[in-house]
Amino acid sequence: MENMEKNWLKTFRILSIEMDSSETTILNLIDPEQFDAPQEPVKVGKRNRFTKEKLAIIKNALLEVAEYMQCTPLQAAAFIAIFSLQVGDGDNNIGISDLQRFFSIRGVNTFPIIRSIKELQEKHYMGKKRIRGSEFFYIYDEVIRCILDNKPQISLGNQMQLDRYDFCSKVSDMIEDRDLTDILFEDVQTLEDENPQVSMIKKLIDNRIGIEDRTLFYEICDDTMKASSQRYGNTNVESTLNDIYDRSSCRMKVARELMTDRNALQKAGLIEKVGADFLADSELVLTDKGRELFMEDDVKLFFKKQSSKKLLDYKKIPQKQLYFEGELNSQISFFENSLLETNFRNLQKRLEQKSLPRGVAAIFYGTPGTGKTETVMQIARRTGRKVYHVDIAASKSCWFGESEKIIKRIFTDYAEMCKVEKKAPILLFNEADALFGKRKDSDASSVAQTENAIQNIILEGLEKLDGILIATTNLVDNLDAAFERRFLFKIKFERPAPQAQIAIWRDRLPGLTDDDYRILAEKYQFSGGEIENIVRKMTMNEIVGGSKLSLESVLELCKNEKLSHHSYTRIGF
């Protein structure tokens, strides 16, 4: 009879009744070699309800079920026992003792049944849960539905498996719905057992991360995926621990570990704390190592989407003509040619062969307004490289220890950008003296200690750089000497020579005569930035006041460009 015509529910019910015997066991009828100790043979006689004909019927029925489930007869017998107890008796937690009573077995004779159940778990027919330290088994609802609906075959395969994202989402649901913390952790362990294909579970266990910390890690992973508008999904420390733990003592123990960076996940470099040093305001995020463990190859897709928000596309940089002369022009041209993709890759290979750092770092220093930042932008545009422009102000936090984490994240973010972008972007530190300044006496204050720690992180980042870093500064004398040797290119920008100034005036303010441009260049030693200020103000006068472009009107504006007619001292630090 074909499977389509077979009433499998009836077959399972009959076998359940026949096999559930308190008088004797029929397991040795199925496969006596599976058992480690001999059993009494099934006796057939007038006082025994098993006749030869009935035994043959039971055995054939078991073989049919085994074929239906694509398993061994012994696995089929174990499945029927649990099916009988779960569906017939309404018990969803079947223990070893229940199976021993069902089959009338004890001791070592239980091992083949346990082994069969484990194999059924691997086939994704059933799951396992822990309650108060004891193991219990249950058949998946999907499998029971196949039998109740008389499906022609049970073919679940990977349908029972969760991917890492659904797995973490399910753990998050468990946390939200939990009654007792101990049961929560047992349920999470059960879910882990049911999903051995999720590789991060084994890696966490191999790294000796306990079930409590694993549960927290899964929750942070789920929060990361739920974040749509942030670089990271943040997990509030206080509210999350309230969700996980029902006892205040346990909650505070874990909180102290997290707030002092002593948690196992923090020590393993998988998560970090951000925000204030107050419990209610502190948050947890995945580190780059944690994201890679969680998302594996998908981290490139995730980071590509998020990192694009931080990168300035070279196609959006307006073309601008810059005018440099002599040695400065030669240095810039050589540096730019070095960043052309073919040259840059060859340079990296050659440096690697010589066991030298592969990264290229440069510092543009000199007078304000001489085109240092604009030169970086034009180099990026011409070499086809995006720019990761570091916000110096945002990199400094008033919270102790946060500035160091922000700076470290800048370098780790940039390293990821280099992996996912076709061409290594340019990491730009504008006005770098704010971060690269001279070291201070570490005994002076906590601020000095923080600034020195930041410098150590930057120095380490320069040593490990695998891309392109450009720093600009107006105050090169304020830079710490330790940074000097880390820069492969050191390019000094000075005020443009008269001929360069004439070219800048002509390019930025067309409409005057050659003599007018010469007079402006000779009378005022302006930088390119200062000339642009004059041009902007002249444009405003034309629009608002109706002024006409003339040498006299431009000279009038030039008089008020500098704060002092002779010299001035930069205000601030």
Image: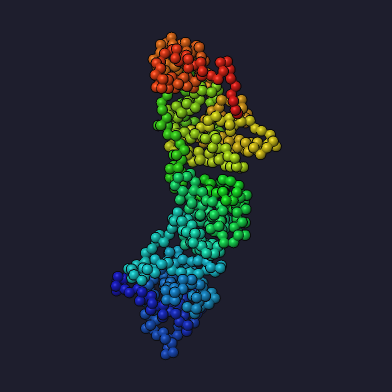
Q: Name the one closer to the observer, 67 or 167.
A: 167
User: At which x and y percent is residue 438?
Assistant: 63, 30
Of residues 158 and 570, which is closer to you in this image? 570
Compared with 532, 253 (above or below) is below
Above or below, comparing residue 156 to residue 401 in the picture: below
- Of 36 and 456, nearer the camera is 456
Location of the C terminus (image quadrant): top right
**Which residue appears at 65% of the width and 36% of the height?**
448
For the point 42% across and 16% down, the residue is 506
Query: Going 43% across and 68% down the picture, which residue do you hit?
Result: 139
Viewer-proximal residue, 186 or 277?
Answer: 277
Question: x, y (%) of residue 407?
Answer: 56, 39
Q: Which residue is at the far right? A: 443
Residue 176 to residue 567: above or below: below
Q: Is residue 571 visible?
A: yes
Residue at point 58% right, 39% down? 397
Asked if one can make out residue 350 in the rendered structure from this viewpoint, the answer is no
Q: Quadrant of the N terminus?
A: bottom left
Q: Tell me, what colour scheme is on the image?
A: rainbow
Measuring from the top left, give residue 489's x and y in whole percent. 54, 26
Locate residue 446, reporting x and y percent. Answer: 66, 39
| Position of 89 relative to 396 (above/below) | below
